[in-house]
Image (spheres, rainbow, N blue to C red):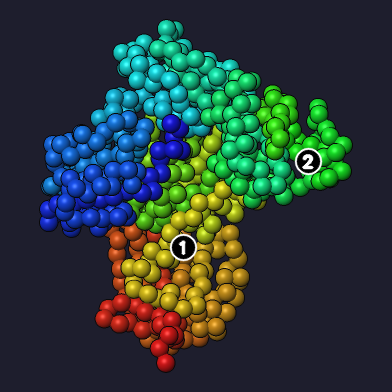
């Protein structure tokens, strides 16, 4: 199984049996059941991807032992002890995702993760979790040999695919081979399947899915290619919702007839051109999706309802995920953000933000830390690394698109690396985290304004503050004060006082969602700028905002 298959467990069931477990389990973002341990585990064994059991490991072993059959199919099992000190990966360490889940549970509960998988304990990268590959073969045998110091000989049969730099290579006799070709299983052999192939496909309307799948399987077998290396399917736009295409279960890329017609192919068809406006679908789509320098390794193959072709990429397609980690700890981090970091080969970010996701990092990751204030250089570095065909996660605090790196990267991508696929993974913003602590100050219309004049002229910030005051909007102030910028917050306070009374509630939250979180309620006239720092979010209420039982509330307006 590849890393992406096990790094994002979305269906997890927590089961508690004692009072302590019942209190701790709701702190996890998973479904929770209290009581009936054995019956619940047996009933839900094939219904979930993982269990978090708030019981002793001995009790868990007696319950799950009879149910275990295959580590690739069994759900992961993590135990949390009664004293709430450890999260223990019991079964399904790598293949089932239990190691990653134990680390995630530990971060959420503030306990110690216990992972006994040998490669993790010794700092060796797990062969079955190498980012960017699907792993097949004798993983256990090769890993055992590496633990004994006999590192495998590593080679690549796919042009353009470099060896993972974290692999320790040796003389063998065990081998690790990067290949998209069919290779017979053998003791001491691990095959890393790269996403090097693109399947081009054309079908008739309402083609039976089983007929199309049979053609794909037969074509790959006949030409000796592994299905695990098929990265995506490419076809014409009019087939984007065709059930037979979607049933292949692979990422889909679609093109217009004009785009396909511009691709030179070995077997064009005048009949197809007259019918749909392009002389080729399968071959052209495969080549187009595979990118510059791609080679058609399987020309058009067909049956009564479909045509398929296979192209091989000249090099890996660069991937850059700009990841919002949220305001602080793992409890406010989205599963998608965690999955993006785990699946990356290279993690880049400001040192503080890299530390914020340290429990997601493994020996297989290359980590690049950079100082604050080098955003453009960091963006270009991320794009350049991704352009070399690697999978990169650029990590940011809060949301990647709010006063963070997403806009810089997307601007730079147009000139630095236009062929890199950039995705933005959202996160909980500082304003949202602060608002949740304060109560509900953002319950109605609101605006966020940064008081940093390092990149924005103060005159522009003033105009925005005046507009917010005049519009009676709740205002969340980012970057309110630092050692080098001490006057801006008080200036903003005076500007806002021109549009709202001095009794307007103000919430001051420092380190929201982090250790040492501090919350203060004040009024606009009494706001003390000296208690505010760079990690503070200041929320200034509107005319309707009030303090209710110690919580800051801006009514939505549902009441008459």
Circle 2 packing at 10 Å, graded few (<14), some (14-19), many (20+), is: many
Nearer the observer, 395 or 509: 395
- Depth check: give the residue in front, 15 or 502: 15
Residue matched to label 1: 479
Front position among marks 1 and 2: 2
Above-or-below relation of 131 to 434 = above
35 left or right of 212 in image: left
Can residue 534 be seen here?
no
**How many angstroms separate mark 1 from mark 2 (CA)?**
49 Å
Q: Is residue 342 above or below residue 187?
A: below
The residue that appears at 40% across and 76% down in the rendered structure is: 441
Label 1 packing within 10 angstroms: few (<14), some (14-19), many (20+): many
Q: Position of residue 482 (x, y in %)?
A: 43, 61
- Where residue 61 sits in the image (x, y, percent)? 17, 36
Residue 250, percent from left and from top: 57, 40
Q: Could you say where residue 163 lies in the image, as x and y percent from the top left?
A: 52, 22
């Amino acid at each position: 199984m590849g890393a992406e298959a096990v790094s994002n467990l979305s269906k997890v069931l927590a089961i508690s049996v004692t009072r302590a477990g019942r209190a701790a389990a709701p702190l996890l973002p998973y479904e929770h059941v209290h009581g009936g341990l054995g019956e619940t585990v047996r009933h839900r064994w094939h219904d979930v991807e993982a269990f978090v059991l708030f019981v002793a490991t001995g009790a868990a072993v007696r319950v799950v032992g009879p149910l275990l059959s295959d580590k690739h199919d069994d759900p992961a099992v993590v135990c949390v002890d009664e004293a709430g000190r450890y999260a223990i990966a019991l079964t399904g360490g790598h293949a089932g995702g239990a190691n990653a889940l134990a680390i995630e549970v530990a971060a959420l509960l503030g306990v110690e993760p216990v992972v006994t998988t040998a490669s993790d304990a010794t700092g060796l990268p797990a062969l079955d979790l190498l980012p960017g590959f699907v792993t097949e073969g004798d993983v256990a045998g090769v890993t055992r040999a590496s633990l004994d110091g006999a590192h495998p000989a590593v080679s690549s049969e796919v042009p353009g695919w470099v060896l993972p730099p974290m692999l320790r290579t040796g003389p063998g006799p065990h081998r690790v081979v990067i290949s998209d070709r069919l290779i017979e299983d053998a003791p001491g052999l691990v095959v890393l399947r790269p996403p090097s192939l693109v399947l081009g496909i054309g079908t008739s309307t309402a083609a039976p899915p089983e007929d199309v799948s049979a053609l794909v399987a037969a074509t790959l077998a006949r030409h000796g290619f592994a299905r695990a290396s098929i990265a995506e399917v490419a076809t014409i736009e009019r087939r984007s919702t065709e059930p037979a295409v979607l049933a292949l279960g692979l990422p889909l890329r679609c093109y217009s007839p004009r785009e396909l017609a511009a691709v030179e192919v070995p077997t064009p068809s005048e009949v197809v051109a007259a019918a749909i406006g392009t002389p080729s679908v399968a071959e052209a789509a495969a080549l187009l999706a595979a990118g510059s320098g791609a080679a058609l390794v399987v020309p058009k193959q067909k049956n009564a309802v479909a045509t398929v072709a296979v192209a091989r990429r000249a090099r890996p397609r660069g991937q850059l995920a700009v990841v919002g980690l949220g305001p602080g700890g793992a409890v406010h981090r989205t599963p998608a953000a965690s999955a993006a970091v785990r699946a990356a080969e290279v993690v880049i970010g400001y040192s503080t933000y890299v530390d914020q996701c340290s429990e997601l990092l493994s020996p297989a990751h290359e980590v690049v830390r950079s100082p604050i204030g080098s955003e453009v250089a960091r963006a270009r570095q991320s794009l350049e690394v991704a352009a070399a065909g690697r999978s990169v996660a650029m990590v940011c605090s809060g949301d990647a698109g709010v006063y963070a790196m997403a806009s810089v990267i997307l601007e730079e991508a147009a000139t630095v690396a236009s062929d890199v696929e950039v995705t933005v993974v959202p996160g909980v913003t500082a304003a949202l985290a602060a608002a949740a602590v304060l109560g509900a100050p953002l319950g109605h219309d609101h605006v966020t304004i940064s008081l940093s004049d390092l990149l924005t002229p103060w005159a522009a910030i003033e105009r925005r503050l005046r507009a917010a005051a005049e519009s009676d909007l709740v205002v969340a102030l980012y970057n309110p004060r630092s050692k080098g910028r001490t006057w801006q917050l008080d200036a903003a306070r005076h500007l806002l006082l021109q549009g709202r009374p001095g009794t307007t509630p103000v919430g001051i939250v420092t380190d929201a969602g982090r250790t040492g979180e501090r919350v203060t309620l004040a009024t606009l006239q009494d706001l003390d700028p000296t208690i505010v720092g760079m990690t503070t979010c200041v929320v200034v209420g509107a005319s309707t905002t009030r303090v209710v039982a110690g919580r800051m509330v801006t009514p939505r307006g549902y009441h008459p």
